[in-house]
Image (tube, rainbow, N blue to C red):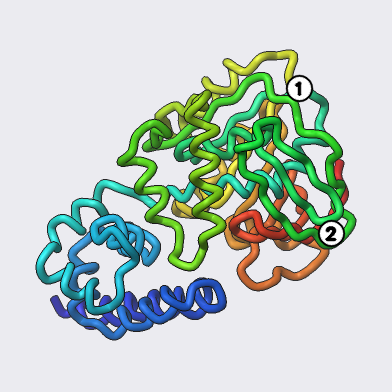
Amino acid sequence: MSEAPDELARLARRYRTFAADEAQGVSPHYERLTQEIAESGVILRFLLDLPAPRRQPNLLLGAATLVAGRPPDIASLTDMVASRAEKLRAVMLRRTTQTNEPARCAVLLPLLAALPQPLALIEVGASAGLCLLPDRYGYDFGEARLAPADPAAPVFRCAVTGPAPLPTALPRVTWRAGLDLNPLDVASDEDTAWLEALIWPEQDERRRNLRAALAVARRDPPRVVRGDLLHDLRPLMVEAPADATLVVFHAAVLAYVTPPEARQPFVDTVRGSRAVWISNEAPRVFPDIAARAAQPAPHWRFLLAVDGEPRAWTGPHGQSLEWFGRIA
């Protein structure tokens, strides 16, 4: 019990940091709310009763949105903790922040299209597998646009700077599979409601794109296998057809593999295979790769790399591509 005040203070700092570093300029609603959470002993004590990995801001905000049916404010969240704590706790213990952002395909596309075709794709941390369908979406890079075959499919807008090798055609994908600890089902209303709850209040375009991508996926669902990327990747790679270029990729996933040194077996598995490895992660996830970037990291960007070589800074939701590297 003597550690509780220190733990409360650390948790409060975590929510203030989230407000300043992640929500500021992106979601005024969540910026204000997480600042208020940091001042609320009631909510902080509720969080402290959860296992440490379940105290993260995005998980609380998504779970509260799912329970309430809309993004909460501080008054409704405080009331929820007082009157519906068990329901909120149950969601936070069952769910994880499996934000399945299909627009991230936009920053992957220049790399995928430049590889020898056709492709066999494996995504680790695939969630519902929406990023396994880059060939079924459309893309608007400003100076270049690729229309989807299905007019109802989403068209992802991505602002490009630098000499990015923008593709002139969609990649050809002949085989695809995902790997996830807790796969989500695109046909499940409960699972898709969770994906939508993870989208921040002001991000209407992301919400529309998610719904359109889910509609595409439901017509031909991608295969997502339940498994651990540290132990179950190799058998999945063996299944990929030998006559296709195998690509193993991930976005905003490896940060959840802790401690950091635990990520190395995954890297060794991929680098020791025939696969091309594409990573799109926060720069702190692979600091050795980030140290070789030709430009310093802009605020709140992911680092796109191929086989451990940095290529570009990307918006975390696929909204921007700041190219500084070479294509091969």
Residue reaching furthest to the front: 151
Q: Is residue 311 above or below residue 5?
A: above
Q: Amino acid at mark 1?
A: Pro
Q: List x then y, in percent, for residue 78.
A: 20, 75
- Mark 1 or 2, nearer chain start: 1
Q: List x then y, in percent, for residue 164.
A: 85, 52
Q: Left or right: where does residue 63 sit relative to residue 181?
A: left
Question: Which label number is shown at residue 181?
Answer: none
Q: Is residue 142 above or below residue 182?
A: below
Which type of secondary structure does the marked residue at label 1 adopt? loop
Q: Left or right: where does residue 93 sit relative to residue 306?
A: left
Please tell me which residue is depicted at 31% across the width and 48% down the height of the picture: 95
Please tell me which residue is depicted at 51% across the width and 60% down the height of the picture: 204
Count residues near mark 1 (Cα–Cα under 10 Å), then give few for <14, some for 14-19, many for 20+.
some
Count residues near mark 2 (Cα–Cα under 10 Å), then give few for <14, some for 14-19, many for 20+.
some
The answer, for residue 148, to whether it is visible in the render is yes
Q: Please name whichever residue, 255 or 273, is drawn nearer the observer in this view of the structure.
A: 255
Q: Please name whichever residue, 25 or 189, is drawn nearer the observer in this view of the structure.
A: 189
Q: Left or right: where does residue 206 sit relative to residue 75?
A: right
Mark 1 = which residue?
A: 118
Q: List x then y, in percent, for residue 27.
A: 49, 73
Mark 2 = which residue?
A: 324
Q: Quadrant of the C terminus?
A: top right
What's the CA distance linking mark 1 and mark 2? 26 Å
Q: Nearer the viewer, mark 1 or mark 2?
A: 1
